Image: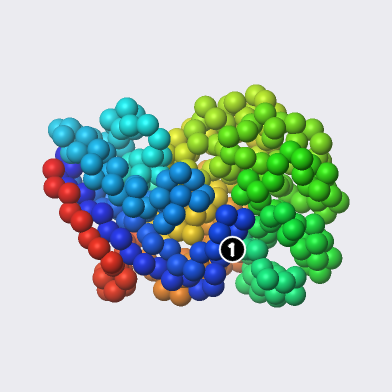
């Protein structure tokens, strides 16, 4: 396809409740949407970079800038582009995986819409619905936490993930386990600990957790491998895994036994599928993480989470978990699952009247 232009659209999405992790509290999302236009079809994608460089080095303004100045001109200069070509064209640009992922996804969406093929079919999905977990942020008190968890279990979520940090770890986990019994329960540290905290993290072994996610720094596979030998709780890596090569290194070192795959973090759905294939070949479980996506990003994530190696419930929660009004028709929980979209491309369209009401800027980049 020939790209005739790219739209960068910024929208402001208030969250239904503040979401606190070890690296900060979000009250709203400043979302960067990408629309790729070709003569055959248009494609949509969501850049998952946060407003500030806290989860990773990327942030929304930076993603928009690198797309505007370097990535979009490189793509529009080509006479023909498909999703596989995006990675090759943008490879000389170092880093900026979330920006690359957004452009690759938008091109892939347009490509599949033109062909009448769904994301799920293209990626190789084996399920038509996926079990859903929910991520619970750090709360002000344990009673507040128990009330929130109770509400999510009542809605039907199949797995609870608790965000933890030093000072908020063993006691909240103990309280949730004692109150709710043998539910599927895991924790996420977002790299808040060091290897010196191994004795404290080992106390979590008593609670039969599915996993502890990213306990140590994202750039330290060696210490994760050392920690894994001191815990019985499986270690899952998130921020440490930015490519299939990183996943291969982590597996070789014994740094993890589970991988959280976030397409934005690894540079797109093609690389996400490569990581899935690698992990599946090595008997490593994977699940699909979330970045508080709108319906645009959630639709594509559901297609990925339907691949056969995704054996654990992901963070692909219902739309209402984060937003009172989504920018697509809402994804609704049904028996603890979300349906995988079956329409062409990502299978959903943004609702124009909703999008217009929350748009803060639009920039058109012609070819």
Is residue 159 visible in the rendered structure shown here?
no
Residue located at (81% from left, 69% from top):
179
Quadrant of image for the N terminus? top left
Rendering coords of residue 37 (x, y %): 20, 49
Q: Nearer the viewer, residue 89 or 278?
A: 89
Rendering coords of residue 187 (x, y %): 69, 53
Name the image colouring.
rainbow
Residue situated furthest front in the rendering: 196
Rendering coords of residue 147 (x, y %): 70, 75
Is residue 17 visible in the rendered structure shown here?
yes
- Helix, strand or loop at disc 1? strand
Residue located at (42% from left, 46% from top):
58
Q: Residues within 10 Å of mark 1 (few under 14, many from 20)?
A: some
Q: Which residue is mark 1?
A: 20
Residue located at (61% from left, 66% from top):
335
Query: Along the horizontal axis of the image, is 331 left or right of 309?
Result: left
Residue located at (57% from left, 55% from top):
23
Q: Nearer the viewer, residue 341 or 209?
A: 209
Residue 135 higher or lower than 240, as above or below: below
């Amino acid at each position: 396809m020939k790209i005739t232009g790219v739209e960068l659209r910024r929208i402001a999405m208030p969250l239904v409740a503040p979401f606190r992790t070890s690296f900060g509290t979000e009250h709203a999302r400043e979302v960067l949407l990408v629309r790729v236009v070709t003569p055959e079809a248009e494609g949509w994608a969501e850049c998952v970079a946060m407003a500030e460089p806290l989860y990773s080095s990327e942030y929304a303004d930076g993603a928009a800038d690198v797309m505007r100045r370097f990535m979009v001109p490189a793509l529009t200069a080509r006479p023909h582009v498909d999703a596989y070509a995006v990675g090759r064209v943008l490879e000389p640009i170092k880093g900026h995986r979330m920006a690359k992922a957004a452009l690759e996804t938008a091109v892939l969406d347009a490509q599949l819409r033109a062909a009448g093929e769904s994301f799920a079919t293209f990626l190789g999905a084996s399920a038509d619905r996926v079990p859903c977990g929910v991520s619970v942020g750090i709360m002000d008190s344990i009673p507040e936490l128990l009330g929130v968890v109770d509400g999510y279990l009542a809605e039907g979520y199949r797995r609870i993930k608790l965000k933890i940090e030093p000072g908020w770890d063993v006691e909240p986990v103990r309280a949730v386990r004692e109150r709710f019994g043998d539910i599927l329960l895991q924790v996420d540290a977002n790299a808040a600990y060091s290897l010196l905290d191994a004795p404290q993290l080992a106390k979590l072994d008593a609670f039969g957790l599915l996993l502890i996610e990213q306990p140590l720094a994202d750039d330290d596979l060696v210490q994760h491998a050392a920690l894994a030998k001191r815990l019985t709780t499986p270690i899952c890596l998130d921020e440490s895994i930015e490519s299939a090569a990183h996943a291969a290194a982590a597996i070789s070192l014994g740094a993890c036994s589970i991988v959280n795959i976030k397409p934005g973090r690894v540079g797109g759905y093609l690389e996400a599928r490569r990581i899935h294939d690698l992990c599946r070949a090595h008997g490593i479980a994977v699940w699909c993480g979330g970045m508080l996506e709108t319906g645009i990003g959630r639709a594509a994530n559901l297609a990925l989470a339907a691949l056969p190696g995704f054996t654990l419930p992901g963070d692909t929660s219902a739309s209402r978990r984060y937003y009172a009004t989504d920018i697509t028709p809402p994804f609704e929980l049904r028996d603890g699952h979300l349906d995988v979209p079956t329409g062409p491309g990502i299978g959903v369209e943004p609702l124009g009247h909703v999008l217009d009401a929350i748009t803060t800027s639009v920039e058109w980049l012609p070819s």
